[in-house]
Amino acid sequence: NFKKYLVLFPPLCYYNNIDLYGGYFMIVQRLWPDDKYDGAVYDDFIERIAKHKGCCDEVWMCTLSGMPALSTHKAFAEKLSGYAEKLRAAGIAVSLQVGRTIGHWANENFSDYSGQPEDANFTVNLSGKTEEGFYCARSEGFRNYFEQVCRIYCETLHPQSIYFDDDLRLRAWDGNMRCACPNCLKAFNERYKTKYASAEELGKAVKEDGETRKNFLAFSYGNLAEFTERISRACAAGYPDVIVGLQHGGYSGELNRHLFAAIKRSGAKAIGSRS
């Protein structure tokens, strides 16, 4: 069946799947992390769904944004677990979105970053610009932090599926490829036996030399795939029955091939895809 997807953004997201041939209508609702969502909100939501049997069969909850302490994530996941039980009792499946991975915009003043790992660093694109709020996926502390975040939520909530956000992409808003931060530049030089001294110098070579461009793309795909495999493995360790998925937005077909392969390598029970 042909399905059309309509997306409305915060604070509530509705994903409406409309079968244009059979008249089928279904809502999957995403609830952003918000301290205003209390038991009364969920009770009201469930009551409304009950009045329209079959209009909604799944809710996507969302992890906290920013990088709060792991104990804060744990407390929030436990809070969500009570709401999840209410939803399941009403026949509504509970899934989850990882609300932030490597970053979607500059760090927000309203988000908590008290748990940010010491070695976490912003990406540097091939024009030499530091992209504030976008984190390098190569940082070991950053990888470990999100492994633990994913495991906490999966262990606590037992979601039907979990989706990584669409920040796993090669380019930020200005369109330049990344990452060429000092750590990535050093690793690239070591892998390909080169001696680039700056992001700008590497960027010039990527533009002018096909082999260098090919190598940098492979290096970048690898960085993001390694990060994806590790957090996917943590999801499966937290709850073996979870479907691990990627929200990809069509930003890079070749990159997505590497990311889906990484999820498969992680041992996840099944793989999900949404744009």
Image (cartoon, grey):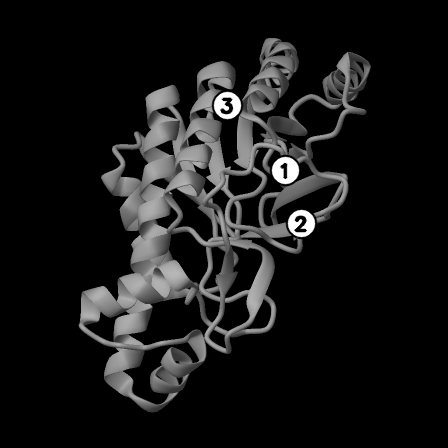
Within 10 Å of disc 1 (Cα), the crowding (few <14, some 14-19, many 20+) is: some
Residue at disc 1, secondary structure = loop
Q: Nearer the viewer, residue 46 or 175?
A: 175
Within 10 Å of disc 3 (Cα), the crowding (few <14, some 14-19, many 20+) is: many
Q: CA distance from mark 2 to mark 1?
A: 9 Å
Dot 2 or dot 1, earlier in sequence: 2
Left or right of 33 in this view: 41: right
The residue that label 2 is drawn on is 107
Q: Are marks 2 and 1 in contact (CB under 8 Å)?
A: yes
Instruction: Give percent across and percent down for residue 129.
Output: 55, 71
Residue 99, picture quadrant: top right
Q: Are marks 2 and 3 in contact (CB under 8 Å)?
A: no
Dot 3 or dot 1, earlier in sequence: 1
In the image, what residue type sits under mark 3?
Answer: Tyr
Q: Nearer the viewer, residue 204 or 195?
A: 195
In the image, what residue type sits under mark 1?
Answer: Tyr
Residue drawn at 39 percent across, 28 percent down: 235
Q: Nearer the viewer, residue 35 or 47?
A: 35
30 versus 139 height, above or below: above
**Residue that protrudes farthest toward the bottom in the picture:** 208
Residue at disc 2, secondary structure = loop
Q: CA distance from mark 3 to mark 1?
A: 18 Å
Residue at disc 3, secondary structure = helix
Residue 26, picture quadrant: top right
The residue that label 1 is drawn on is 113
Residue drawn at 61 percent across, 51 percent down: 5
Residue 100, picture quadrant: top right
123 versus 161 height, above or below: below
Residue drawn at 76 percent across, 13 percent down: 39
- Residue 128 seen by the camera: yes
- Residue 20 seen by the camera: no
